[in-house]
Amino acid sequence: MAMAGGGIRLGEGFHTRVVSHESFLPSSSHVCASRIRGRCGWTVRSGARASVSVQLREAGSVSESFLEGIAQELYSEKENLEDGDGGRDRSMASYIQTISALKEQRLGSESGEGSDSESQLGNSLAAEAIKAMGRPYVRDVYISKPKPERGSFAKSNDRKRGRDVVKKDKYVSVSVRDSKQKTISLVKTIEALPQMSSVSHLLEMSELEFTSRESSFILNGLKNHDKTLEVFKWLQTTGKSRGNVYCYNIVLKILGARQEWERIEELLVQMDEDCCMPDDYTYNTLIMSASKAECVDLATGYFQRMMRKGVPPTKLTYSMLMLLYQKYGRVPEAEVVFSHMLESGVQVVAAYSAMIAIYTRGGFFEKSEQIMKDMQNFDVAPDRDNWLKQLNTYGQQGKIEEAEHVKDTVEKLGMSLGVVGYNSMITAYGKAGLYDKASLLVEEMKARNLEPDEVTYSCMIGACGRAGKLKDALFYFEELKRLNIKPRSSNFNTLISLYGKSGNVVGIVRVIADMKKLGCKPDWQTLDAVVRAYDRAGQTKKVTQVLSLLRDAGWAEETGSYGTLLHVYLKCNLQKEALGVFLSMRKAGMAPKEYMCRSLICACKDAGMFEDAIFVFREMQAAGVVPSLESSCTMINIYGLKGDVKESEALFLSLRSSIQRLDIIAYNVMINVYMRFEMHEEAIRIYKLMQEEDKLPPDSYTFHSMLRLCQKCNLQDQAEDVYWRLRYSDVEMDEVMCNCVLNTCARFLPLEEVHRVFQEMIDDGYAPNNITFNVMIDLYGKAGMMDRARKALKLAQQLGAADKISFSTLINGHGKRQDFPNMEATLWEMQNAGFGGSLEAHNSILDAYGKAGQLEKLEDALARMEKSGFRKDLASYNILINIYGRRTMIAEMEDLVHSMQRDGFSPDRWTYNTLIRTYGYADYPDKAVQTFKFMQDAGIMPDRVTYIMLVAAFEKAGNLLEAARWSLWMTQAGYTK
């Protein structure tokens, strides 16, 4: 749109629509650009403009609503206007401002006297419009059809029509002119009334009939909106507003400017009562008012009401709504309006551009590209703004080929990319890692006299960040400061990342200091950049020192920084600080991510902060975060560590009922909890439940747990079952598993099977631990396979796994077989190996010599033991008591008992049973009974061996009655003979 010499320059098609409008004056009542009398004249020649200047010659001929309608039509045509250098902003407000200027000039002209004011109307209208909007750029509009040759007949017809129009103008009704003069006079009178005066009396005394045209003119002519509303109220009261939609539209515009939404709702109800159907101008006025007030939901509501009333939206409707949604990023509402536009068949390029921008800003690039394809399918020609939106979409994705294609297309169409277009291309090259091409574009901009702006240098800094060019980034950063442009936080963040990549943490501190100096407040992305940089430099624990610098620069904890802070505090093992951040998140109403909660729970568990872990678990559930199976299993373990088995059970059962299928970890954790509290039967029950699950084979941890359980509970059958399941499973028999098998169930399995496992372990290159070697030496020794036992000891020595127990076990094996030379030789090897003997080894030697009846060697071994610095322990005394008791050496045995007690050792059940047996064999049943009483007084419960020895003692003494009594007591105690 541009101003011509006599008014507004219009396109040919639009001029035809305006003139044919029912509310517009006849063709004789307006003057065209060519100044031909009484008709519209088009200058039609190759390459010439086709324009018409509309001027309203009669003051009351057109209502304000029609003038606003012209503005809306002009605004809807703005996509077809060319954006050239110096082009004006074609906002809706600018068009309305132009029309208002024309209207005011029209009012002033008609209030003057005589024909002089009318003759000057055309020039004055143009002057006022230019004054209101500035001198706009005149756009060339080329007519697509060639100008036909005009013959003499056509020229004569034109002259005839011109004479007819002039003749018709001479017979304008004088009464109409008088009515208009009265209307103008009334408007001036109302305006001149004092502020508190009532206009009702003045209106009642008026000679006007208050027709629809007159009422609309009065409302539109009043500059004081309070008086406008008062006049409208009188019109409603007298019924003059009935059926006059123009009056309502004027008032709705005033109320919308005042943002009196409740009164607008009341007025819409009154419109229905006055038989006024709202039209598209009504709703466009409301939508525009809501848009200016930034009430997005309200504008959407007016559009929905427009749909319900069956009023078809215009191009202006779609343009306003889409631009509003673009401004506030309202994707769902924009999609609804855009879909309705497509269904209605209306094509608005501005709406397409807005939809592309909305999707691009939201990161929905595929949808943005689909909009571009739809434009091609519907033959919608993009304008410059739309091309730039497409270029930005490809640029944000780093799609070079597509972006370059759009750039070439824009340049071929003779349009200028401008700074915005170049910035989009720089973004594209930067995101694609083509820094050199991006820098060449900056030079090209300068060559075309386009001054790079803040966005340009920010894009270049971002490109440097992706290319890892710290020096160049610092150069462009200095360019920003040279232009007195305050750098953005994103620019500082890029520099921090680049310093982090180079491992220069000192540079990071310097950047933070610059942020403080330049007054740029760090945000959560700054914190994230700092943390990533320190992570990359391997100095995460020093981030806590940088936090104080960030706070000094103006950074404060915000919702976006909570996740990063949690990461930092957990990395630095600062569980309390991490809990503080978690509490801040909950107070802010945020639902933490599940992995954050899981990490915090695990950190609290490792620190022994079980109550805090339970608090985090309950809070995440309260926030609606569904705990993962890993989090729940961790909590089962925490409850077990805390000693709350019932909570562990409840959580496990809840998981089992809520989740269709648990994994093996849940079962393993529950088994471990039960084993920790020696609830072996419950652990076995969980193991059986696991076996009932289809396609849930036990893993290595399960087999470890069950084998240890069988060892503790001496469950031979179950141990064999677990072992054979292990052998036929897919679990690898690695070093840990082989050691576990040999340590836990070697005594439950056939010796050959145990030997096979041990041999496979060695053949596979696995190293048995010292417990495994000791078990194997013991098994070989008890089976009489002393050669294998000695080989096992040699191998243990070679692998450094031999210990005192290894030698002691072999000594015990030789002693059991009364192989005294090898027994003594092994003791000597043990001492030479640096172990210096052991009490267990000496006890084994004492037992071997004693059972062989070699008391002299026993005494010698006892002396050597004491000389080596080993004092007798309870096992030593029991061995000696047993040896002397078997030989009925009562006195020596009793001396040993007294000596044992003097050394601070209390007899145990084995000691008492040995004494009872000895007294029984020596025919001292009374002493045997006395020993039994001592045993009871010591709090030691008799076992089956105790009762059998007492019965045997009385039978040997011939006291069968007493033997029967003891036999009865044994039966009552639950033992069988």
Image (spheres, rainbow, N blue to C red):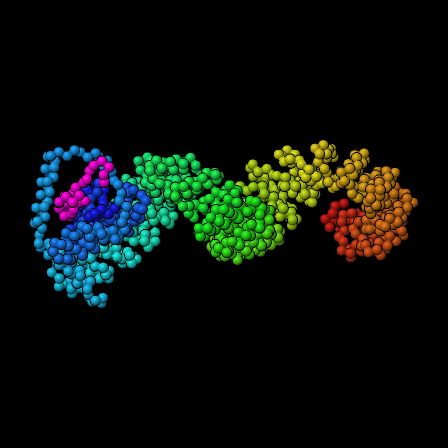
x, y percent for residue 108: 18, 56
Q: Position of residue 946 (x, y in %)?
A: 79, 49
Residue 456 placement (x, y as % from top left): 43, 45
Q: Determine if residue 16 is in view.
A: yes
Residue 36 on the magenta span: yes
- The N terminus lies in quadrant: top left
Residue at (89% x, 47% y) in the render: 864
Q: Which residues are magenta?
A: 25-49
In which quadrant will I find the C terminus? top right
Q: Nearer the viewer, residue 251 or 149?
A: 149
Whether residue 862 sits left or right of residue 644 in the image: it is right
Residue 805 vs 247, above or below: the answer is above
| Residue 440 figure quarter | top left
User: 393 or 446: nearer the eye?
Assistant: 446
**Residue at the spot x=67%, y=36% of the render?**
734
Tell whether 680 sits left or right of 148: right
Name the residue at 46% across, 44% down: 460
| Main secondary-structure element of the magenta-colored stretch | loop
- The one nearer the camera, 372 or 505, is 505
Give the percent coordinates (x, y) of residue 21.
18, 45
* Extreme residue toward the right, this view: 856
Residue 961 shown in magenta = no
